[in-house]
Amino acid sequence: MTERAARILVVEDEGLVAMALEQTLIAFGYDVVGPASNTRTALRLLASEESFQGALLDVNLGDERVDPVAEALAAASIPFLFATAYSDPAALPAAFRDRPVLNKPYPPERLRQALVQLLGRAEETSAR
């Protein structure tokens, strides 16, 4: 029996960034849900029958913030991390400033390491 690849929800509004991110995640062996370019699409994916083990969130999606998606993910106990160009922690949603952050631009290997840590923490939490 083969183990299924972890599914990652990608929430990113920049089309080229989302496409590159999707290709990178696939190359790392993950399945990609989305990408979602706005909160409405991300929340719809979260409410759908699709399951995923983690999420990668851009903080600003055009003229809206990703806060409602972060809140929904936290409520569903789905681990997530932020990918942002903001270096100031105050730019993150206040309730989630303790979450992991990838500062853009980041090398692909840093993304891989961050996801391994994120998903490893989720497995540790669910084993307790």
Image: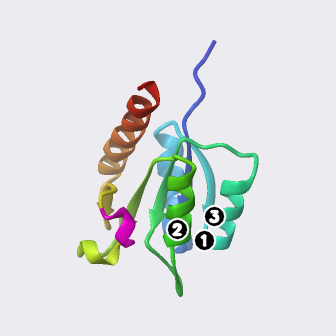
Q: Earlier in the sequence, mark 1 or mark 2?
A: 2
In the structure shown, which secondary structural element does the residue marked by tag 1 occupy?
Answer: loop
Image position, residue 70 (x, y; %): 50, 63
Image position, residue 99 (x, y; %): 34, 56
Range of residues picked out in magenta: 93-97
Q: Amino acid at mark 3?
A: Ala
Tell us which disc is closer to us: 3 or 2. Answer: 3
- Disc 1 marks which residue? 37
Q: Are marks 1 and 2 in contact (CB under 8 Å)?
A: yes
Q: Is residue 95 magenta?
A: yes
Distance of mark 3 from mark 1, alpha carbons? Answer: 8 Å
- Disc 2 marks which residue? 12
Dividing the picture into quadrants, the one containing residue 121 is: top left
- Disc 3 marks which residue? 42
Distance of mark 3 from mark 2, alpha carbons? Answer: 10 Å
Quarter of the image containing the C terminus?
Answer: top left
Q: Amino acid at mark 2?
A: Glu
In the structure shown, which secondary structural element does the residue marked by tag 3 occupy?
Answer: helix
Distance of mark 1 from mark 2, alpha carbons? Answer: 5 Å
Main SS of residues in magenta: helix
Q: Residues within 10 Å of mark 3 (few under 14, many from 20)?
A: many
**For the image shown, how many numbered marks are present on the structure?**
3
106 left or right, relative to 37: left
Identify which residue is drawn at 23% across, 76% down.
Answer: 88
Image position, residue 15 (x, y; %): 56, 72
Q: Amino acid at mark 1?
A: Ser
Residue 20, label in figure: none
Identify which residue is drawn at 46% across, 30% down.
Answer: 126
